[in-house]
Amino acid sequence: MSETLLIVLFGIGIGGMLLCLLRAARGPTTADRVVGVDGMVTITTALLVLLGFLLHRRIYLDVSLVYAVLAFVGVLVIARYLERGL
Amino acid sequence: MTAAILGGVLMAVGCLFLLLGGLGIYRFPDVYNRLQAGTKCTTLGAVCTIVGVGVAEPAWIFKAVLIAAFILLTNPISAHALARASRKSGVPLWEGSVVDMAEAPEAGEAVNAADTDGVEEQR
């Protein structure tokens, strides 16, 4: 797997993340912004693993796993707050 | 060599689906449409990318499959919680939406029985 191709794939993922960030910045309601942030979280989890493969560092797998767990809990808390308050 | 090619193809498909998921989140007209496009596309893209990395680097396959299974389990849960929360907090539907199952909860059986008829009538 050539390194240039991996960097191009990483750039494609970053493009998807920028679109989610644009929706999180522009969204008319709060739920739109939370949807954008949720998409960004999932894309970040995948791109961290890809970055670890690109840099040959195994620690990025652990970082990605912890990030996925914390983001899941965060999104659930925000959804509960939108539904009936804390 | 074969494992590297297979992993590269999986990573390419996954990154393409990540981009398409972001495009869906940006372009769709409604919170519920955005949730549908974003959740399905980014879940498939993330799982494909992570499993592709695990295939290309066989020493990492256990943790990669663990992360992929976690994403596959928890992403629909958070999307469902978000959809229910935005429905209950009164976010309106897009004006082009055809059917709204949550509008009449007491007529749930009738709506389910006459599913296609209801859709045709409202069109």
Image: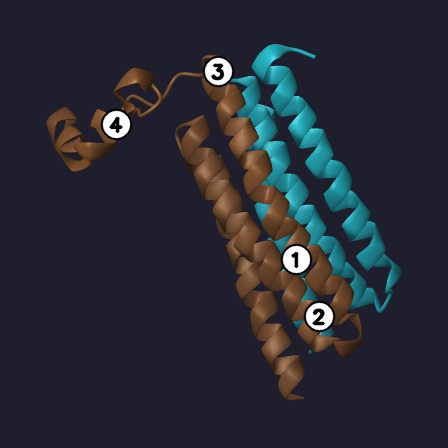
Q: Give the amino acid at mark 4.
A: Glu
Q: What is the chain letter for disc 4?
A: B
x, y percent for residue A23? 55, 31
For marks 3 and 4, the one nearer the N-term is: 3
x, y percent for residue B111? 23, 27
Q: Which residue is mark 2?
A: B54
Q: Are marks 1 and 2 in contact (CB under 8 Å)?
A: yes
Cα separation, mark 2 vs mark 4, equals 46 Å
Q: Which residue is mark 3?
A: B88
Q: What is the chain letter for disc 3?
A: B
Q: Residue at position x 49%, y 38% from top?
A: B25
Q: Give the amino acid at mark 1.
A: Ala
**Image quadrant of residue A55?**
bottom right
Cα separation, mark 1 vs mark 2, equals 10 Å
Cα separation, mark 2 vs mark 3, equals 40 Å
- Secondary structure under tag 4 reads helix
Cα separation, mark 3 vs mark 4, equals 21 Å
Q: Which residue is mark 4?
A: B109
x, y percent for residue B81? 56, 29
Picture disc at residue B68: 1
- Shown in cyan, the chain is A
For marks 1 and 2, the one nearer the N-term is: 2
Q: Crowdedness of circle 2 by 10 Å Cα count: few (<14), some, many (20+)?
A: many
